[in-house]
Image (cartoon, rainbow, N blue to C red):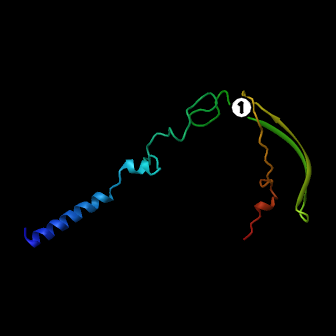
Amino acid sequence: MTTTKINTLFLYLLFIQVPLVAQVSIDSISSAGHSNTNKFKQLKEELSTPNSYRTASGAPGRDYYQQKVDYIMDIELDDENKKIYGEEEITYTNNSPDELSYLWIQLDQNIRKKDAPALEKKW
């Protein structure tokens, strides 16, 4: 082979390989932790199977139940000493057909109140 033919062959192989390397297979995307990105894919992973508690759309089903909590709180914040004082009465009604082995209660500030300080713009 002449030098010109070798150089042409080398360039030809170089340009053929570049487009092949740029192609990514679906298997390599899945193995990297990504799921199917097809816009028309089935939503089996995202939506649970419909049952009597939830329909396929996520709306409440015929056996849907809502837990109920009523509370009375008398709370005082002591900003100067960075303390909170108060009393509360919490009445929890378990409307679930299942027995609850524990109940988690978390106290958060009322940021939904119309005059809540958290809603004030600070800019």
* Neighbours of disc 1 within 10 Å: few (<14), some (14-19), many (20+): few
Q: Residue at x 81, y 58 (%)?
A: 116
Q: Is residue 64 above or below residue 19?
A: above
Q: Residue at x 25, y 60 (%)?
A: 17
Give the image location of residue 54, x and y in percent.
62, 33
The image quarter containing residue 118 is bottom right
Looking at the figure, which quarter contains the C terminus? bottom right
Identity of the residue furthest to the bottom in this view: 3
Give the image location of residue 14, x and y in percent.
23, 65
- Pick whichever, 43 or 98, lies toward us: 98
The tally of labels here is 1
- Pick whichever, 62 or 46, lies toward us: 46
At label 1, which amino acid type do we have?
Answer: Tyr
Q: Is residue 54 left or right of residue 39?
A: right
The image quarter containing residue 65 is top right
Secondary structure at badge 1 equals loop
Q: Is residue 123 left or right of residue 21?
A: right
Q: Residue at x 81, y 49 (%)?
A: 107
Return the residue at label 1. 65
